[in-house]
Amino acid sequence: MADSSTQSIVVDASPDRVAAVICDFSRYPEWTDAVRRTEVIEEYEDGYASQVRFVLDAGVLTDEYVLAYEYAEDLSRVQWHLVAPSKMQRSQRGSYDLVGNPDGTTTVTYTLEVELSVGMLGMFRRKAEKMIMDTALKELKRRVEEGGAAR
């Protein structure tokens, strides 16, 4: 498996608020440009999604895949992995780690490891991961700070 990429951002909100937006999968199409549809296909007893289907359209990259999720009890960590290979991905592992700061902000660290079905040189894969993470973190920050509703 390839090395993972990591990136962080500070969000002007509590970890609970950030986690609420991250875990509200049905609303991802409202605030993430590339996600066209989501469907929670399995839930844990506590109501958190255990498996989510994503339909992605990022221009040159389109894909449909299912991710399995696990959560830290206090939601300080949300991690996932690809359930089965998709059209574009052999594997995907990722996580959000949320750390509350004394000033009321939250540092969100996103770690992502993707192995594509199509061949790609390592430096291009890392650049693609960086771009995906950068966009995802900026969209998450904007959604949380604008007060986007979480259920």
Image (tube, grey):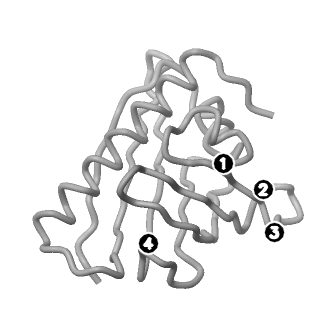
In contact (CB < 8 Å): disc 3 and disc 2: no
Kindly identify which residue carries mark 4.
92
Which circle, 4 or 2, is nearer the viewer? 4
* Alpha-carbon span between mark 3 and mark 2: 9 Å
Percent x, y of residue 68: 63, 71
Tag 3's secondary structure? strand
Horizontal side, residue 144 vs residue 150: left or right: left
In space, the residues marked 3 and 4 are separated at their CA atoms by: 19 Å
Crowding around mark 4 (Cα neighbors within 10 Å: few <14, some 14 to 19, many 20+) is some
Q: CA distance from mark 3 to mark 1?
A: 20 Å
Mark 3 or 4 closer to N-term? 3
Three-letter amino acid code of the residue under disc 1: Asp
Residue 75 drawn above or below residue 145: below
Residue placed under numbered mark 1 in the picture: 74
The label nearer to you, 3 versus 1, is 3
Q: Secondary structure at mark 1?
A: loop
The location of residue 151, given as percent across then percent down, is 81, 34
Q: Residue at x 63, y 65 (%)?
A: 69
Kindly identify which residue carries mark 2: 48
Return the residue nearer the eye: 19 or 27.
Answer: 27
Indicate whether 55 appears above or below 139: below
Instruction: Give the SS element for disc 4.
Output: strand
The label nearer to you, 1 versus 4, is: 4
**Residue at the image position 52 percent from the left and 72 percent from the top:** 81
Provide residue 145's location: percent of width, then percent of height: 54, 18
Q: Amino acid at mark 3?
A: Glu
Q: Nearer the viewer, mark 1 or mark 2?
A: 2
- Quarter of the picture containing the N terminus is bottom left
Earlier along the polypeptide chain: callout 1 or callout 4? 1
First-in-chain label (3 vs 2): 3
| Residue where numbered disc 3 is placed | 42
